[in-house]
Amino acid sequence: MALSESETKILTALAAEQLTVQRLVAVTGLTETTVRNALYKMTYDGLTVGRGSRPATYEISDLGRLANSRRLGQFVPEPPAATS
């Protein structure tokens, strides 16, 4: 599965934290339409997961981490686990 440049930017941003569409636009410099279209495709493909609504937040899935790490040539680390 080949990732576009836009998809790689979005997955890289989501590897650090969950983000809304508006935050992804600000972080990646992509247009809102480009971000929404890429998220739709990547959610369908299992690379991202949307949570909640208005505004929904998106996060990278395990499959998305794997796809992005292959694209970047390195492993994209998971965020630190919450300690109890």
Image: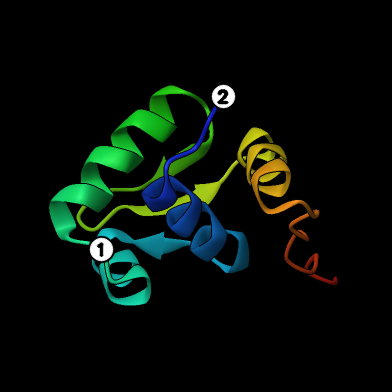
Which of the 4 image quarters holds residue 12? bottom right
Is the residue 39 above or below the residue 15 in the image? Answer: above
Depth check: 19 or 37 in front?
37
Residue 51 tag number: none
Point 23% across, 39% down: residue: 37
**Amino acid type at mark 1:** Leu
Task: Tell me the residue that label 2 is attached to.
Answer: 1
**Amino acid type at mark 2:** Met
Is the residue 64 above or below the residue 35 in the image? Answer: above
Which of the 4 image quarters holds residue 65? top right
Q: Position of residue 6 (x, y in %)?
A: 37, 51
Q: Say what secondary structure mark 2 lies in.
A: loop
Q: Say what secondary structure mark 1 lies in.
A: loop
Q: Earlier in the sequence, mark 1 or mark 2?
A: 2
Task: Tell me the residue that label 1 is attached to.
Answer: 30
Which of the 4 image quarters holds residue 29? bottom left
Residue with the most extreme bottom position: 26
With 47 as the anchor, is 22 left or right in this view?
left
Report the colour scheme.
rainbow
Point 61% across, 60% down: residue: 15
Q: Position of residue 19 (x, y in %)?
A: 41, 64
With 50 as the anchor, is 23 left or right in this view?
left
Depth check: 23 or 84 in front?
23
Q: Position of residue 77 (x, y in %)?
A: 78, 61
Depth check: 68 or 53 in front?
68
Point 14% across, 50% down: residue: 33
